[in-house]
Amino acid sequence: SITSLPMMHWSNRVMWDLDKSLWCGYSIQSTINNSCRKFLFTGDTGWFDGLNDIGKRYGPFDLAAIPIGAYHPRRLMKSSHMNPEEAVRMMHAVRACKAFPIHWGSFPLTLEPVLEPRDL
């Protein structure tokens, strides 16, 4: 089963539709050899307290794809992108047994070095 879950990010496709649509991630659950497996794909998100609720309601997750990148300057990026510390915090909040980072090292978008999450 696939369940859409709320995440936090801005959205728009054209100049006049800023934040007119919702942003989401997905919980994907499957049974393999009589064992339930859960995967969380967060997409792009900033930290928000609802992540704790997602962990309580839908977790624990066997594996989670957690975004790290495009996080400096924090005053501008905090609401939509996670720094490495927040990504670790998210892993615990959603109750992921294992996680892997996404959205880092792709291309320079903000002020931090593009490989900084790996180097920390």
Image (tube, grey):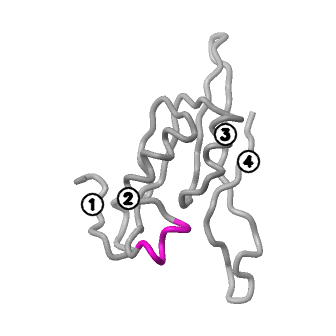
**Residue appearing at x 38%, y 72% in the figure:** 72
The answer to whether the residue labelled 4 contacts the one labelled 2, judged by CB atoms less than 8 Å apart, is no
Which residue type carries mark 1?
A: Glu
- Residue 62, image x and y in percent? 54, 28
In the image, which disc is placed on residue 27? 3
The reply to whether callout 1 and callout 2 are in contact (CB within 8 Å) is: yes
The answer to whether the residues at label 4 and label 1 have Cβ atoms under 8 Å apart is no
> Gap in Å between the C-alphas at discs 2 and 3?
22 Å
Please give the name of the residue rendered at 58% of the width and 31% of the height, measured from the top-left corner.
61
**Element on which disc 4 rests:** strand
Mark 4 or mark 2: whose residue is earlier in sequence: 4
The residue singled out by tag 2 in the image is: 104
Secondary structure under tag 1 reads helix
Q: Specify whether residue 100 is painted magenta.
A: no
Q: Which residue is mark 1?
A: 116
Provide the residue designation for mark 4: 4
Tell me which numbered mark, 1 or 3, is placed earlier along the sequence: 3
Q: Is residue 52 above or below residue 74?
A: above
Q: What type is the residue that disc 3 sits on?
A: Ser
Q: Is residue 48 above or below residue 5?
A: below
Tag 4: amino acid: Ser
